[in-house]
Image (cartoon, grey):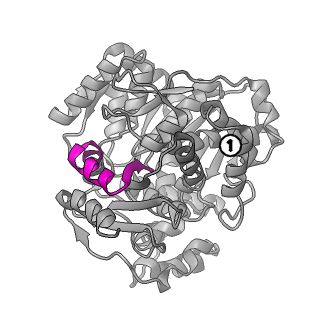
Amino acid sequence: MLYQSTRGDTEKLSAAQAIVHGLSSDGGLLVPESIPHISIEAISELVSKPYYKRAAHIMGLFLSDFSNDELTRYSKTAYREPGFDHPAIAPLCKIDSKTHFMELWHGATCAFKDIALQVMPHLLTASLRKTGEKRDVCILVATSGDTGKAALEGFRDVPGIKIMVFYPHDGVSEVQKLQMTSQRGANVNVAGIQGNFDDAQTGVKAIFSDKDLCAQLNGGGYILSSANSINWGRLVPQVAYYFSAYCDLLGNGEIKPGEKINFCVPTGNFGNILSAYYARRMGLPIAKLICASNRNDVLTQFINTGVYDMNRMFYTTVSPSMDILVSSNLERLLFELSDKDGGAVASYMSALSENGCYEVPSGVHGNINDIFAPGFCSEGDTLETIADTFNDSGYLIDTHTAVAYKALKNYRQASGDRSAAVVVSTASAFKFCESVLEALGQSFTTGGVALIDTLSEVTGRPIPAPLAGLGSLAPRFPGSIGAHDMKSAVADFLLQSN
């Protein structure tokens, strides 16, 4: 299968080339030329298989450069203890007869990004071999909190690869920050920036498009790639867990083969819910994808109106990984729903860059509404949902999962839709202790990682192993830089360290 740009570049890349390069040469995102189909019979055959075999099968439908044996080996290595503390990898937790939570936080950093970023280093190193690339790779990452640590952990000390992560210095939780700034590994670097996630993401994209810097790095023996979901190698492993959730519902007798279900996804950069969209396009029986936003509800407004407008107030919220106004992966959806019209997508992205907004035609907007339902959750409702869920069922959720659960409740009340639904639970509550304790009505005098023990004592829930010793770690990468200093920081990291 070949990959093409969302912005009309006629160059076609293999799967391995797409993973190595991350972005198209015209600045667009890479997407498959066609979407593979999987029948309900084939889905049913996956029910009896372990997660790593399910993942290998789904990824193999997109990654034709890789054999099933290769993908099975990579998946089996990635999805095992001690990296994951649950044998199901992405287990379901049933709250009531129609509602399950898919727990994607059983990996090395207690966030959903682990599921893609534990297997992606295998895909990237193999892609380098397949494409004959001799230069070392520097992975650049902009993170709103969770991608950074997951990428750092996944690529730590991988030969031939260096990784640099940029995060909003004052826009992540204290646990998220210490996870990144204390990262071990000789090939890693972390920089907090004085700005928000959108500033970090814009800066990383500018580095990729800076021809002079790329030429300088090339002279030093480096090429750039990405571990954000703008890289197809990050996105495709996420498609697999939507199929896995459906298989588990089938295996437990919760649904019948072919029965449509809903997924509700807490959404910021649109990568996670886009993975669900691709699963739906492949044939997974999904009725609605509920796109849950926090106070930064640019996606909610877009789904409602067809106008994407980032000219608005940016809020720092209790669900910081969703504090995003420029949702990069929306570009892929627009390409698919605009009959693969790269020129149209390029014009949207140009308008966004120049004016901060764009409007899609009514036909495209109608296609979006057929698939997606918008959801919104306020700060107060987020905390109330955490408390209600714990008090009613004893189930502990983090702030991002609470946004999604509240959005699902609102959707059901407004639509009357009582289909079986899966809430995508993206992080452990222990990564956001202060907000979760506040939601549970607890007062505290300390802050940051010291509250991990407090949350465990209050809830009776064990501390996830990756977070248990976090408080004893000292930051290796303290301080922050201006967003305008990101290019020089990359150059210094790579060229001065040679």
Placement of 403 over or under 262, stated as above or below: below
Characterize the local packing of mark 1: few (<14), some (14-19) or many (20 or more) Cα atoms within 10 angstroms. Answer: many
At 42% across and 74% down in the image, what residue appears?
178
Q: Quadrant of the C terminus?
A: bottom left
Placement of 273 over or under 171, stated as above or below: above
At 42% across and 81% down in the image, what residue appears?
444
Secondary structure mainly formed by the magenta segment: helix
Residue sitting nearer the eye, 122 or 475: 122
Residue sitting nearer the eye, 441 or 92: 92
Which residues fall within the magenta stretch?
205-227
Is residue 174 something one can see in this rendering?
Answer: yes
Instruction: Give the residue type that dot 1 points to.
Output: Ala
Res. 393 image quadrant: bottom right
Taking the image as shown, residue 379 lies to the left or right of residue 151, namely left
Taking the image as shown, residue 459 lies to the left or right of residue 414, namely right
223 in magenta: yes
60 in magenta: no
Element type where label 1 sits in the image: helix
Placement of 460 over or under 199, stated as above or below: below
Give the image location of residue 259, x and y in percent. Answer: 72, 27
At 63% across and 49% down in the image, what residue appears?
102
Give the image location of residue 29, x and y in percent. Answer: 39, 34
Placement of 209 over or under 490, stated as above or below: above
Residue sitting nearer the eye, 17 or 437: 17
Taking the image as shown, residue 486 lies to the left or right of residue 475, namely left
Q: Quadrant of the N terminus?
A: top right
Question: Which residue was labeled with disc 1?
Answer: 55
Give the image location of residue 267, x and y in percent. Answer: 44, 44
Is residue 383 something one can see in this rendering?
Answer: no
